[in-house]
Image: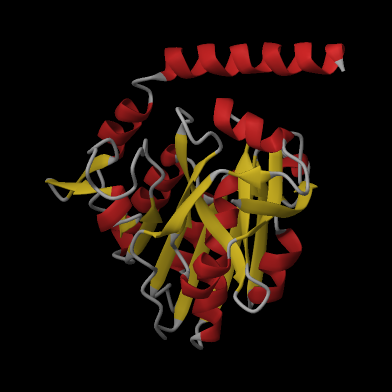
Amino acid sequence: MNTILAREQLSESVFKIRVEAPHIASERKPGQFVIVQLDTDFGERIPLTIADANADEGWIMLIFQAVGKTTHLLAEMEIGDTIANLLGPLGQPTHIEKLGRVVCVGGGIGVAPLHPIAKGMKEAGNEVITIIGARSQDLIILEDEMKAIADAFICCTDDGSYGRKALVTEPLKELCEADPKPDLVVAIGPPIMMKFCAETTRPYEVPTVVSLNTIMIDGTGMCGGCRVTVGGETKFVCVDGPEFDGHAVDFDNMMQRLGAYKVQEDHDHEKCHLEIAAQKVEA
């Protein structure tokens, strides 16, 4: 069992928890993730990226958005509750090296998995520029943490309620047009955001890495649920990724696959809402 040691609500639907997991904390590297299962019998298994960890204290940090049944149930858990199964660290770690100028772009909840990568790039001696964006100010997360890492920091909101009123691709394009241009761009966020970040950097031939979060069941490459097309070849996000060359990912196919079970997901999420509401009334 993995005990929840700390819990914080970052926005209306985004939560941060610290979970006791000493073995995972000692082995994890930037870019890796865990598979979370709340119910040992028939519970859904979902991938969550490790946003931070402390090997000495034996914990990992998970940041997630309550968008489906399992994440909604996880958001209802309190300090002292235990997560039945926590498998990891999984996936290929980020390739960290000194390259020069690295631009880290995070959209919404994507800032969470971006944080350890930006930190690793900075520790490797790179100049790190971070761009974070969200629909509005209340959805901005980890601003102070990303500022502490970055040599330059840019915040964007779609509605202009905070920072610069722009999509993250706007300052990204400006940086690609600058001299020197970035040596690497790491973009993590919603699929459509990563797609357009990759399209922004493509004309400038700036290498661009994206981290994919697809439907995943076992996390070991056996089920095939997380398969994506990269450079015309089939890859499995759980074992070949989660990071890939953004210029080679077939985002349209990936987004189509992500929506394959939307009806069932919406039904279960609504049912979960009603059950939790009924329990609170009874209490």
Identify the residue at image location x=26%, y=47%: 249
Tell me if 174 is positioned left or right of 203 in this view. right
Q: Position of residue 229 (x, y in %)?
A: 20, 43
Which residue lies most toward the left here?
232
> Seen in the image, is 134 located left or right of residue 250?
right
Q: Quadrant of residue 25?
A: bottom right
Indicate how the structure is coloured in the image.
secondary structure
Which residue is rendered at x = 44% and y = 14% of the image? 264
Residues 234 and 222: in front is 222
Q: Quadrant of residue 253?
A: top left
In percent of width and height, residue 197 lies at 42, 51
- Compared across the picture, whether 189 is left or right of 282 comes to left
Residue 257 visible within the image: yes
Q: Position of residue 38 (x, y in %)?
A: 56, 37
Work out whether residue 166 can be spotted.
Answer: no
Q: Identify which residue, 206 or 19, lies in the foreground.
A: 19
Number of numbered discs: 0
User: Residue 236 location, x and y as percent?
Assistant: 24, 48
Viewport quadrant of the C terminus: top right
Asked if 159 appears above or below 125 in the picture, the reply is above
- Left or right? Give the position of 120 relative to 228: right
- Give the vertical position of 20 relative to 229 (above or below): below
Q: Residue at x 53, y 33 (%)?
A: 39
- At a point 22% along the width and 43% down the height, the residue shown is 222
